[in-house]
Image (cartoon, grey):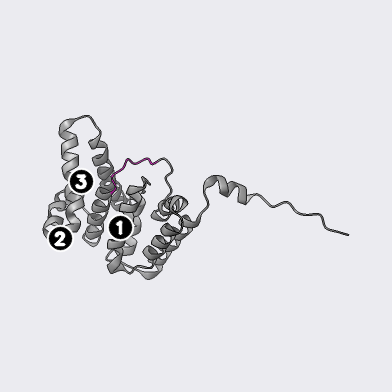
Amino acid sequence: MTDALGDRRRRFVSYLYGLHNGLGSGNTKRASESRQALARLRRMFSGPRQEAEAYEYVFPHDPPQSEQEVWLLVGGLFALHPQSRRGPTRRSSLGGSMGELEATRGSAATRRFTQLLGRDRDALAHHLRQTLRLLAANEISVDFDQLLQDLVVLLGDRYREDEAHRVRLRWAREFHRPPTSQAARTDEPAEQSPVDV
């Protein structure tokens, strides 16, 4: 990824986080504009006409043609789960966020995550919408900067199976990573029992 493209992606995601900040800004006009933008981005999942209403919030950020559908999807996903950039226990991928959900929801979250990992490109967007709604209901943050990067690999026009597989593996690794306090305990060597001579 060129630095210029990385900067465009970061600016777009910063714009999305700014919409959330606008909701609680205390500025009536800004809050109203943010609410309207998020509603239109959220409705983009309803059909082609509603998707067209979301273009005015995505295309000014100049997505590359090969990524424009991914940027629209990320805009809609953010609108389903608007949040500030800094979450209380942020991990680095959707897998990490689902790992946090698993800590409270148990095997139901594990099944949902396993299903998400196994989806093909055509079904992934639908399952991502369900996943973001579930994370929103449980107030678990998502790193949308990383999500955009990952979805460009998983859904972009330049799809390569080996790169997509690496994204899925990273999600799975972060899902199964123990919480920080537990990781510190399991990294310590176990006490060795004395050997009889």
The residue carrying mark 1 is 130
Magenta residues, dominant SS class: loop
Between 73 and 175, the residue placed more toward the observer is: 175
Q: Earlier in the sequence, mark 3 or mark 2?
A: 3
Q: Residue at x 86, y 59 (%)?
A: 196
The residue carrying mark 2 is 47
The residue carrying mark 3 is 38
Please give the range of residues in magenta: 81-87
* Residue 122, x across and y down, in percent: 27, 68
Q: Earlier in the sequence, mark 2 or mark 1?
A: 2
Question: Taking 129 as reference, is 60 left or right?
Answer: left
Q: Residues within 10 Å of mark 1 (few under 14, many from 20)?
A: some
- Disc 3 to disc 1, C-alpha distance: 17 Å
Which secondary structure lies at badge 1?
A: helix
Three-letter amino acid code at the position of disc 1? Gln
Viewer can see residue 2: no
Q: Residue at x 43, y 53 (%)?
A: 105
Three-letter amino acid code at the position of disc 3? Leu
* Residue 19, x across and y down, in percent: 23, 41
